[in-house]
Structures are given as C-alpha cells and as structure tokens.
Image (cartoon, grey):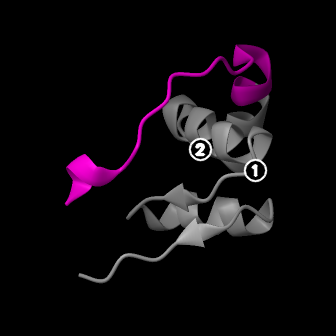
Amino acid sequence: MYLQIPVRLVEVELTESVELADEMGLYAYDAYLLRCAEKFHLPLLTLDHQLMEAAKKKKVHVLEVEK
C-alpha cells in the first residue's frame, strides 16, 4: 500500500528546518518533513505522535492512519 504514495524530491531551506526543530523540540529530520508539508501546503503522513502534535500547532493537516 505504501508503494502507492507518490514521492517528489524538493528543496527545502535547511536553516528554516533547523530553526523549526529548535522551536518545536523536534529532531532535524522531523522538522524537515514538517517544513516540506508546510511550504508546499501538503498533508503530513506520520505515525510519530510528537510530529503530529507539532504539525497541528503549525496548522499542517495530518493524515490519520488506521492501525
């Protein structure tokens, strides 16, 4: 099922991602994903609860996944 998720490589400013990581208390790679979703107005797909909460605070839509 996950193979059906489209993937596109994009550039995101590293400085903004690191600042977001510091602001939200996230790992840098989580902040990078959050910044991508925020920058391109896309939903975030994650099972990480801390990242979900950060996304909601930044008003980034999170796709809920049923387990």
Please identify the residue farthest to the bottom as the structure is shown.
66
**Residue designated by label 1:** 41
In percent of width and height, residue 31 lies at: 62, 38
Please state, as top left, top right, bottom left or bottom right, where the C terminus lies in the image.
bottom left
Quarter of the view holding residue 65: bottom left
Report the disc number at residue 67.
Answer: none
Residue 43 lies, in percent from the top left, at: 61, 59
The earlier-in-sequence mark between 1 and 2 is 2
Which range is magenta? 1-18
Please state which amino acid type lies under the numbered disc 1.
His
Q: Residue at x 19, y 60 (%)?
A: 1
Residue 40, compared with residue 63, is above or below; it is above
How far is disc 1 from disc 2 in space, using C-alphas? 20 Å
Residue pictured at 56% horizontal, 39% vertical: 33
> Was residue 49 drawn as part of the magenta stretch in this picture?
no
* Numbered circle sitting on residue 26: 2
